Amino acid sequence: MTDKALADWLARLDRRSPESRIDLGLDRVRTVYRRLTPNGPDCPVITVAGTNGKGSVVAMLEAMALAAGLKPFAYSSPHLVEFGERMRVAGQPAPAADIVGALESVERARGEIALTYFEHVTLAALVLARESDPDVMLMEVGLGGRLDAVNVIDADVAVITSIALDHTDWLGPTRADIAREKAGVARAGRPVIVGEKRRPPALEEALQRIGAKSIMAGRDFTWRRAGERLHVRVDKRLFSLPHPLMSGQWQAANAACAVTALSALGERLGLSEAAMGRGLTSARLPGRFQRLSEEPAVYVDVAHNGAAARELARALGEFPGRSYAVFSALAGKNIRAIGRALDGCFSDWLVAGIDDDRGLSAAAIDAELAQIPVSGRRETVESVPRAVELALERAGRNDRIVVFGSFRTVAEAWPTLMHQG
């Protein structure tokens, strides 16, 4: 009954303000938050922004805290399977009953203030965080940074993982515009960890105006892989750690950001190098270049912009058998950039629409891919589940299937993939 109550609440929020609706700004959220929690968090807060890598950094920080015997609260979005994935207490999804109670608290506090779906859910997460009395709060930005609802909290340490072109309708058409928006999570006199090595000058300028203590990749912290070890140097301190278990070469950079963020907190959490290492080998995050099965090899990845697609292409590399792409995307995504990055990776493209008001049709996606054009045979399919079924029917034991394009693409494919065979 509680699961139904949560589903009913989420449907109610979506009817009032569809999840796809974006209305950036902090005034509404700040007013309601002050009614809910006048004094703010009682524990350190790490806020993570960036185009790609945010979820991975939060997952690593969460696993490190758990390995040290601490109780973290983690907030991230969107979810893949269950809504409770967005709000985790001590590494576990929050119970549906607790989420419902938090949503109701926000409803009472908002009065006549209209909130978007994401704003209401974020405030509910902050209610849950307060009630769970965590040792550290780990908050993933939803969109941008400066005007995102998560930014109602003053982060003790901010992290900006990467800066690439995405959500340009909201954040601006250039990397400089996007950098300025993401810089908004930083606070005067407090550390901000920047994992982007090729950062636009606009980012450093924005952080200087804020007065944040910038800790920059390649300048203030570095990392390198040596066999199965990851060496992270932060200022004069060297951390020798096991390489993250999560797949993808890019996870080394995410791990370095997480280690540097914890180092910046100093003694407030006091995590040992050993706990960091245990966390890196236990951190998991579904949908990030995740291999689900063998013969054929099946991967899922939430790559949904050009930068993420380039990393996916590097991870896939050359492949001797047939390689099937199951691809779909939401409106506003640069399909051509994704296609160009992955051109040559697939012998077959199964292009599907997403069952969502934000989803592009298969025909619209295919028309964009045709403009490149991507190599390989393209076929439009009515849905992501059907595209997965076709890929599984056609792929031989030595072939490969890669499902990617957005969180929603992977989420729609998930039930079919879990029941294959």
Image: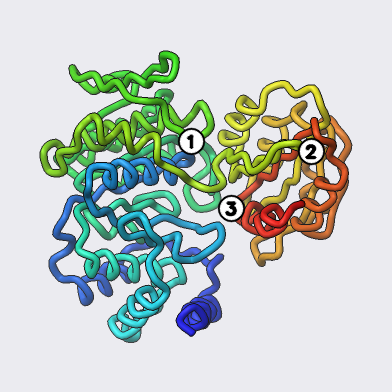
Distance between mark 3 and mark 2 Cα atoms: 19 Å
Q: Which mark is residue 407?
A: 3
Tell whether 409 sits left or right of 352.
left
Q: Which mark is residue 246?
A: 1
Residue 88 position in % (x across, y down) = 36, 59
Please tell me which residue is depicted at 34% across the width and 71% down the height of the picture. Answer: 124
Residue 131 position in % (x across, y down) = 23, 70
Q: Which mark is residue 324?
A: 2
- Tell whether label 1 touches label 3 (CB within 8 Å): no
Please tell me which residue is depicted at 71% across the width and 59% down the height of the picture. Answer: 354
Direction left: furthest residue = 267
Q: Nearer the viewer, residue 299 or 360?
A: 299
Tell whether 236 sits left or right of 346.
left
Q: Nearer the viewer, residue 273 or 335?
A: 273
Mark found first going from the N terminus, 1 or 2: 1
- Is the residue marked by circle 3 packed among few (<14), some (14-19), or many (20+) residues within 10 Å? many
From the viewer's perspective, is residue 391 above or below residue 111?
above
Residue 292 position in % (x across, y down) = 64, 43
Q: Which one is in front in this view, the residue at disc 3 or the one at disc 2?
A: 2
Distance between mark 3 and mark 1 Cα atoms: 17 Å
